[in-house]
Image: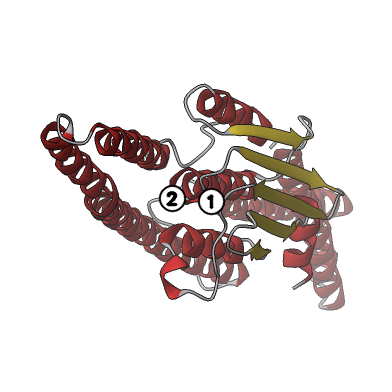
Amino acid sequence: MRRYKKKLTNMIWKNMGESMIASILIFLIIIYFLETNEYIKRFEPWLMVKHSLTLFVIVLVIGTLFGFLQSNKIKKRLDRLHDSMLLLEKGNLPKDIPSLGEDEIGRLADQLSEIRTKWEDQITSLQRLSTNNAQLAEKARFSAVTEERQRLARELHDAVSQQLFAISMTATAVGRTLNIDFEKAKRQVSLIEEMASVAQSEMRALLLHLRPVHLEGKRLSQGLHELLHELNSKVPIHITLDMDDNLQLTKGVEDHIFRIIQEALSNTLRHSKASEMEIKCSYNGSIVRLMIQDNGVGFDMNVQKHASYGIVSMKERINEIGGSIQFITAPGKGTRIEIRIPVVSERKGEQDVYSN
């Protein structure tokens, strides 16, 4: 700001100096004209000097005053233009950029006014888009919540509800056969115990889906350790985790990996009948390798019914971050999930955006 004012002050002095030089030239031209036409010879020498000095002072004062007034007028116009530019620079739209004439400064003010109008239109469009995006996000969130509720309701009905109904029917049968066939009653009690265990696993798997989808500000390793510590105390599966605690990825990638592991845990609890589960996660600087393996019953990937929601969800999440996923399984052979996720550093991504 001080530099700008200094430049304007220098401009005023420069214009005043140029006006003084122009005044001197005008004075010399007048003297030459008077001398040529012999007007000066009519006066006495001392009067000639007096009138010449008087004329010189008058011309010099008028020229200097004219230069000062013109410079000051230009300075005021530039000040108004500069104030408007400062407001734009700070992100504040000036109410109006005044018209400053038809010369170069006026055209510059008109161009700045057009920039202000376009900027205002862009801000209005961005705010409108922001509002629309917020509304769409709210609708998407509501739709996702509704869809998840419907899915959980179906899972409860198809799995837990049927298991509880079977337990109820078997318990009724035990009451009828206990005094008639004790061995059969024992088998029925064992069946009830097995079905109750399955129902419990189903419920724990469903409750796993109700956990937070995101890490909520935690690092991936911390979130996984807390999740597995909680599960190991509640489920009959020994789950081990092998990963570098200092592993740090972008938030989006970590959230997707966390949710994928949640889906894999849910599927294992519900379907695998496994006693052990192993999770390994490694990162070599460019690729994240994730391996999830259990010693359960496995399944046939070619059977349509096993294309479950969990598998589809894992594939979709992997596709969203440009990774690949492979299921290696067979009936009675357990299940191994191998995932590869290429990772591009944020700085490299920014360079690619700017280069394009």
Residue at left offset 59%, top offset 38%: 275
Residue type, numbered disc 1? Leu
Q: CA distance from mark 2 to mark 1?
A: 7 Å
Image coordinates of residue 346 in percent, x first then y, are 74, 51
Report the residue marked by disc 2: 94
- Crowdedness near tag 2: few (<14), some (14–19) or many (≥20) residues, C-alpha within 10 Å: some
Element class at badge 1: helix
N-terminal of the pair, mark 2 or mark 1, is 1
Report the residue marked by disc 1: 88
* Labels 2 & 1 near each other (Cβ < 8 A): yes
Residue type, numbered disc 2? Pro
Element class at badge 2: loop
Quadrant of image for the N terminus: top right
Left or right: residue 84 versus residue 37 is: left
Image coordinates of residue 109 in percent, x first then y, are 53, 64
Image coordinates of residue 205 in percent, x first then y, are 41, 41
